[in-house]
Image (spheres, rainbow, N blue to C red):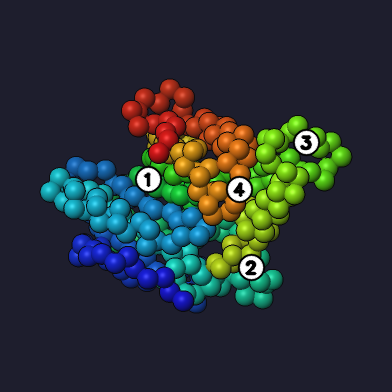
Amino acid sequence: MAAPQPAMMLPRELIHDTIVLAHKPSAKIHYTFTPGRLLQSSPHRLIVFLNGLMTDKSTWLPIMAGVIRRHGDDGYPPLLAYDRYGQGLTEDQDPQDQGREKGRGHDVGDVVRDLHQLITQIDKDRISGSRGQLHIVFVANSIGCAIARLYAEWYPGFVEGLLLLDPMMASSKFDWWPDPDSDDFSPDDVPEEVTVEVLREQRSKFATIFGTDVINNEGLDRRNLADLLPHSDQPYLQGLGGRGPVVTIVEHDPERFAADSLQSMGTPISLSMKYTNPIWHHYNKGVAQITDPNLTAPASGLHKV
């Protein structure tokens, strides 16, 4: 079923359309785009919004609308959001999945190649492929951050900036807590109020919902994601002009996350505060090292919201 658009009036500058990628002519991708309002001297730039695994492009539309309303007089660059195959308003599954095991037809690497083709066609057909080097800025959430990082690695010299909103730990199998069934487990490893039964239940619940082998609606196989991005702080990314792109990471608030995890998953707050949040923060500190350490930009670095 197609995802509903947000219940709000969207600016007429936002164009909703479908596109067929040249290398996958049997399927359509749904996207939302605005060509922007630029001065003649403005860089050839495109801001691309990348969805998480459990969200679609409708989450970005209020942000795109806000950019248009706030900067309509001053000018703003082209904006693009899209739903990957099998996600949101893109009802077609990835043609690559045909004849393959359900949910195992394509991986994040395939998504990155599709994204590059999408950007190439949008640039040519809707912006202007003749204005010189395209400057890409990614705004990404969750697994979208892994897609953005891999794109910047595979297509060096194109990405000007990455705004990473609560990046998923690409090298993690969501096995954050001590295993009560392992030989080296000690009850002292967990907070006093957390029983072995609760720990075992939480590990099972997270593995069932978030494990990399869990099949999702879009059929995106995540089992090799840790092989594609095995390190948080590597590789070093090459942006425009041989320098690193501006990388800004926005973390979740640890106390809010712990409270939300208690409500949605029944996770004891002490487990989130002792294990999940510190591990995630350590991972994000590593991600902040994938660009030029001498880059001077006020917004660059690690932030919490």
> Marks 2 and 4, how far apart in space?
28 Å
Residue identified by numbered label 2: 103
Q: Amino acid at mark 2?
A: Gly
- Mark 2 or 1, which is nearer the eye? 2
In front: 80, or 69? 69
Give the mark, 3 or 1, whose residue is nearer the N terminus. 1
Measured in 3D between alpha carbons, the distance from the residue under mark 4 to the one under mark 1, in whole angstroms, is: 35 Å
User: Which quadrant of the structure image shows residue 109?
Assistant: bottom right
**In the displayed structure, does residue 156 sit left or right of residue 70?**
right
As measured in the structure, the alpha-carbon distance from the residue carrying label 2 to the one carrying label 1 is: 30 Å
Give coordinates of residue 1: x percent, y percent: 46, 76
- The mark nearer the N terminus, 3 or 2, is 2
Which amino acid type is shown beneath numbered disc 3?
A: Pro
The residue that disc 4 covers is 267
Which residue is tagged 1?
137
**Given contact means CB atoms under 8 Å apart, are the residues at marks 3 and 2 in contact?**
no
Residue positioned 62% across, 75% down in the render: 98
| Residue 50 occupies quadrant | bottom left
The residue at the far top in this view is 294
Q: Secondary structure at mark 1?
A: strand
The residues bearing labels 3 and 4 have C-alpha atoms spaced at a distance of 17 Å
| Residue type at numbered disc 4 | Thr
For the residue labelled by badge 3, is the local secondary structure a helix, a strand or a loop? helix
Q: Is there a contact, CB below 8 Å, between mark 3 and mark 1?
A: no
* Label 3 to label 2: alpha-carbon separation: 38 Å
Please report the residue visible at 41 percent of the width from the left and 70 percent of the height from the top. Answer: 3
Q: How many neighbours does mark 3 have within 10 angstroms: few (below 14), some (14-19), or many (20 or more)?
A: few
Which secondary structure, mark 4?
loop
Is 138 placed left or right of 168 in the picture?
left
Q: To which residue does mark 3 refer?
A: 187
